[in-house]
Amino acid sequence: MAETLRRVLTRDGAAWSGEENTPVAGLPLLLLGAPGSGKTTLLFAAALEAAGEGQGPVLFLTRRPLQSLPRGTGTTLDPMRLQKIRFQYPPSTRELFRLLCSAHEAPGPAPSLLLLDGLEEYLAEDPEPQEAAYLIALLLDTAAHFSHRLGPGRDCGLMVALQTQEEADSGDVLHLALLQRYFSAQCWLQPDAPGPGEHGLRACLEPGGLGARTEWWVTFRSDGEMMIAPWPTQAGDPSSGKGSSSGGQP
């Protein structure tokens, strides 16, 4: 999943390996960030990216419907891609468990990507470590089941977004440590000083042994458009990329 997210965060859309649109699911990825840091936007951008690979539909799980489709997600909001994204809204942990446990009964083609937004809301209902471990196991098993249905050489990716807090309590720390045991690939979204009328952050992608750490400067303008550039320490000219759009206008 790090490879898919890297394509989203790379302005030209090319895969980090140099090959474009290569359907490699890779390790499950954990997307971490504070409230309002753009986690949902990046998840949706990953969904659009995967939907354009022609490998199968995308299953996007979230507690409540999106109020609007995120802007500037790196890929044009192609209606054909949007049709491949299946949104489901389990309102509680119990309903999420039920949905994941019945995934093998769902008709139609198997998803090539499973996304879960707002994991912290489900964990908050029952903060016991064993419940968190059970949910993680279900997510991993569901992705493995979809991979089996997709056939040899094709895997279902898994990406989960978790909201972090500046002052985490012991339960939050325990949950994060548990998640990091199973999600070695991680992307941290860290707030940074934006320009006037902008919301900026630093995106740090750790691919979990599948490549070097990479960082980007991500800015959300007042109209919601997402702008992406290499982090200054990795760019030849620190000021050359900050004005470049990700190119995704609805």
Image (cartoon, rainbow, N blue to C red):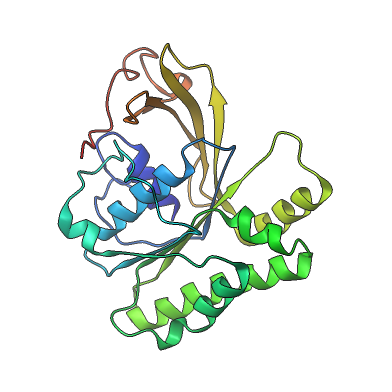
**Res 206 visible:** yes
Relative side of 133 to 158, left or right: right
* Nearer to me, 140 or 151: 140
Q: Position of residue 119 (x, y in %)?
A: 59, 56
Relative side of 93 to 231, left or right: right
Q: Position of residue 99 (x, y in %)?
A: 50, 77
* Nearer to me, 75 or 185: 75
Task: Identify the residue at horizontal 31%, vertical 30% (top origin).
Answer: 225
Q: Quadrant of residue 139?
A: bottom right
Q: Position of residue 160 (x, y in %)?
A: 52, 56
Q: Quadrant of the C terminus?
A: top left
* On screen, residue 157 above or below 193: below
* On screen, residue 227 above or below 115: above
Q: Quadrant of residue 111?
A: bottom left
Extreme residue in the right direction: 170
* On screen, residue 144 above or below 127: below
* Nearer to me, 161 or 197: 197
Task: Identify the residue at horizontal 43%, vertical 56% (top origin).
Answer: 1
Count of numbered badges drawn on the protein = 0
Q: Position of residue 2 (x, y in %)?
A: 45, 51
Task: Identify the residue at horizontal 21%, vertical 57% (top origin).
Answer: 81
**Res 53 visible:** no
